[in-house]
Image: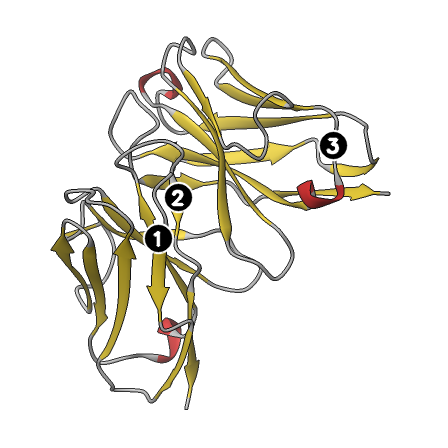
Amino acid sequence: EMQLLEYGGGLVQSGGSLRLSCEASGFTFSRYAMNWVRQAPGKGLEWVSGVSVSGASTNYADSVKGRFIISRDNSKGSLFLQMTSLRGEDTAVYYCAKTRAGPTPEDAFDIWGQGTMVTVSS
Amino acid sequence: DIQMTQSPSSLSASVGDRVTISCRASQTIGNYLNWYQQKPGKAPNLLIYAASSLQSGVTSRFSGSGSGTDFTLTISNLQPVDFASYYCQQTYSTPLTFGGGTKVEIK
């Protein structure tokens, strides 16, 4: 069974940093682009960032550009999101998501993790 | 950035009803449109990709149509398990964007 498991969320002060991890199992991680998506409490879905299969190509939402860095370790089947200069508006559940078929992030997301909560206090 | 506008934001329907949800893109996106279902406290679940292709394992009561800028998700014979929120997403270009969501509630 294909699964994603996120961890690393928690409570952090405004201006602080946090690193999220996502571990994949049940599929060949290195064949699929990966993404992070977040959802603020009671709000809709917001795409945060995506990375190609090799890790060489990355994309970010304007709201996080320059503060967040996405990366991956194909040898370990892991995806990461390094978050710095955190703000109150970054408070959300963060999901990692696998692309359905392709090597680039611009594809439907067919497998999602259960999410990890990040709370930024002021 | 491509803006995705869903309508309605919420609707009430009865078991057995046929429900349609609309999604409009601010510019043409071909068929790069996906639909997700999300239940409270759970991760989203892919229903439809490429505007009209049914994801493996998803009931055929769900169908999608449209191309260019206007898209529709249809739920036939609404069942109790279908009461949830639904989101469209464009994957034509980054930043990838989602619609604001449609909450389907029991009448």
Label 1's element?
A: strand
Of badges 3 and 1, the one in the foreground is 1
> At label 3, which amino acid type do we have?
Leu
Which residue lies under the disc numbered 2? Answer: B97
Marks 2 and 1, the one that precedes in the sequence: 1
Residue at image point 21% right, 64% down: B72
Residue B77 found in image quarter: bottom left
A16 to B72, vertically: above or below: above
User: Residue B43 location in percent, x, y?
Assistant: 49, 51
Q: What secondary structure is marked by label 3?
A: loop
Rendered position, B30 above or below A70: below
Name the residue beneath numbered marker 3. A86
**Quadrant the C terminus of chain B occupies:** bottom left
Q: Is residue B84 left or right of residue A106?
A: right
Q: Give the CA distance from mark 3 to mark 2.
A: 22 Å
Q: Are marks 3 and 1 in contact (CB under 8 Å)?
A: no
Element class at badge 2: strand
User: Which residue is at a point 82% across and 35% down the rendered structure image?
Assistant: A14
Q: Which mark is residue B4?
A: 1
Residue A31 against residue A4 in the figure, above or below: above
